[in-house]
Image: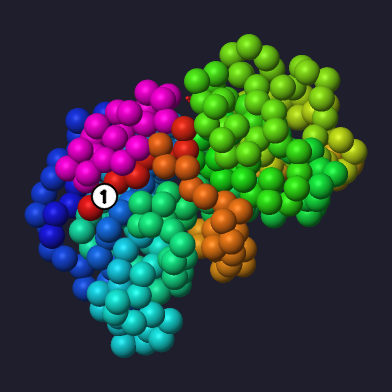
C-alpha cells in the first residue's frame, strides 16, 4: 500500500511516498481502509521533533515512520475477538494512542480506537473530528456544566480544537468569545461566536472581562492572569501552547487551585474516550456541531498541506483525501 513516510525529524520536505506492506489486524484489532485523514498539531510537532518533549524515547530518529492521527474510513476485516464492528462499517477515530499511521491507505488498531461515523457527515468532515473534537469536548467537560448564563472564552478559536470548542459551548446556549488572528475572525463568527478578538490588537487577560470557562489552545499566561479573567467558580482549561507553562500548571496548578475558587488546570487527555465520543457524536448528528474544513489536499500533497498548516492561514481543519 502507499504511505507517506519519514526517517528524520525536520521540515515537510522529509516526507516521501513509499510502498509499504499492508498491516494485518491482530485478534482484537480492525483493518480500516482510510478514506480521509487530517492534520493535527501533534503530527506537526512529531514531524519537526520540536519542542524537545516530542523526542522523548526517540531522541535522534522518529519512533513512528508513518504519522497521521485522524482516520475516517471503512472497516475491511476484523480480528477473531472483535464483535464491535464488521467489514463494511464506516468508522472514525484517533490513532495517536495506537501508533499513528493514518497517512496511508490502510491502518490497523484496537477496535475501541474507532466509533461509527455519524451518517450525517461526509468522510471529509468526519476526518476533521477525532483529535480536535475530542480535545474540545475534554476541555469543556472538565469544567462545571455550561448553561445559557455561562460566559466562555476560547483562545485559539480559529484552530482545529477552537472551532469545535466554540460550537460545543454554543450548543449549551453560552455566550462565547473567540480569540485569534484577525484574518480568522470571520470563520470564528461563522461557527457561532458572539464576540471575536484579534489577539494582535487586544489581550483578553487585560480587558477586564471575566468568564466561567476559558479554553486555551495557545496558553502562555500566568496563573494570576487566568484567575483575573475568571468569574468566581470559573475554570481555565489549558490544552495547548507553551510547554513550560503547561508543565508549571500541571505541577502546581492543582495545589494552588485548591486555595482558590477560580481553577487553572491542564485536563488529562484520553483519546477516543467513550463518553466524550458519544457526547460529540450526538452533537454532530443533530447538527449543533459542523466540522469547519478549511481545505482539502490529496495524500500525495501531504508535504504542501503541512507547509500550509505551519503558515498560520488555516481556520478549522486541513483534511487529506487518501
Ligand atoms: N492537551 C493535550 O493532551 C493535547 C494533545 C494534542 C494536542 N494538543 C494541543 O492542542 C493545541 C491546539 O491544537 P489545534 O489543532 O487547535 O491547533 P491549530 O489548528 O494550529 O490552532 C491553534 C490556533 O491558536 C492560534 N494562536 C496561536 N497563538 C495564539 C495566541 N497567542 N493567542 C490566540 N490564539 C493563538 C493559532 O493561530 P495562528 O498560529 O495562525 O496565529 C491557531 O488558530 C495545540 O497546542 C496542541 O499541541 C494538546
Look at the picture and state if 298 lies above or below 322. above
Whole-percent x, y for residue 37 in the image? 33, 51
Whole-percent x, y for residue 19 in the image? 9, 54
Residue 248 is at least partly visible in this image: no
State the predominant SS element of the stretch in magenta.
Answer: helix
What's the coloring here? rainbow
The stretch of residues the image draws in magenta is 295-314
Q: Report the front residue among 54 and 166.
A: 166
Whole-percent x, y for residue 305 in the image? 29, 35
Give yes or no for residue 97 being in the magenta stretch. Answer: no
Residue 278 sits in which quadrant?
bottom right
Give yes or no for residue 312 being in the magenta stretch. Answer: yes
Residue 271 shown left or right of residue 275 in the figure: left
Q: Report the front residue among 3 and 128.
A: 128
Look at the picture and state if 321 lies above or below 259. below
Residue at image mark 1? 321
Find numbered disc 1 in the image and state the secondary structure of the residue it sits on. strand
Q: Report the front residue among 89 and 100.
A: 89
The quarter in which the N terminus is drawn is bottom left
Q: Residue at x 37, y 87 (%)?
A: 81
Q: Residues within 10 Å of mark 1 (few under 14, many from 20)?
A: many
Amino acid at each position: 500500500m502507499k504511505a507517506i513516510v519519514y526517517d528524520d525529524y525536520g521540515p515537510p520536505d522529509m516526507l516521501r511516498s513509499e510502498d509499504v506492506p499492508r498491516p494485518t489486524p491482530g485478534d482484537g484489532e480492525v483493518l480500516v481502509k482510510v478514506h480521509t485523514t487530517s492534520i493535527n498539531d501533534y503530527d506537526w510537532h512529531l514531524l519537526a521533533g520540536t519542542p524537545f518533549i516530542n523526542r522523548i524515547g526517540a531522541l535522534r530518529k522518529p519512533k513512528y515512520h508513518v504519522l497521521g492521527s485522524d482516520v475516517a474510513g471503512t472497516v475491511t476485516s476484523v480480528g477473531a475477538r472483535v464483535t464491535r464492528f464488521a467489514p463494511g462499517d464506516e468508522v472514525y477515530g484517533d490513532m495517536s494512542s495506537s501508533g499513528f499511521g493514518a497517512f496511508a491507505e490502510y491502518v490497523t488498531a484496537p477496535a475501541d480506537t474507532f466509533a461509527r461515523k455519524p451518517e450525517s457527515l461526509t468522510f471529509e468532515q468526519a476526518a476533521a473530528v477525532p483529535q480536535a473534537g475530542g480535545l474540545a469536548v475534554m476541555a469543556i467537560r472538565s469544567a462545571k456544566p455550561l448553561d445559557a448564563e455561562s460566559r466562555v472564552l476560547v483562545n485559539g478559536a480559529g484552530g482545529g480544537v477552537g472551532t469545535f470548542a466554540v460550537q460545543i459551548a454554543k450548543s449549551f446556549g453560552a455566550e462565547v468569545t473567540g480569540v485569534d488572528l484577525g484574518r480568522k475572525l470571520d470563520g470564528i463568527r461563522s461557527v457561532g461566536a458572539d464576540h471575536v478578538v484579534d489577539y494582535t490588537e487586544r489581550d483578553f487577560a487585560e480587558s477586564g472581562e471575566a468568564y466561567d470557562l476559558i479554553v486555551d489552545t495557545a496558553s502562555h499566561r500566568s496563573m494570576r492572569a487566568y484567575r483575573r479573567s475568571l468569574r468566581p467558580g470559573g475554570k481555565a482549561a489549558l490544552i495547548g501552547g507553551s510547554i513550560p507553562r503547561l508543565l508549571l500548571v500541571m505541577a502546581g496548578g492543582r495545589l494552588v487551585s485548591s486555595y482558590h475558587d477560580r481553577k487553572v488546570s491542564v485536563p488529562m487527555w484520553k483519546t477516543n474516550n467513550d463518553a466524550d465520543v458519544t457526547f460529540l457524536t450526538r452533537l454532530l448528528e443533530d447538527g449543533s456541531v459542523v466540522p469547519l474544513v478549511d481545505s482539502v489536499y490529496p495524500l500525495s500533497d501531504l508535504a504542501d498541506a503541512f507547509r500550509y498548516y505551519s503558515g498560520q492561514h488555516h481556520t478549522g481543519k486541513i483534511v487529506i483525501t487518501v
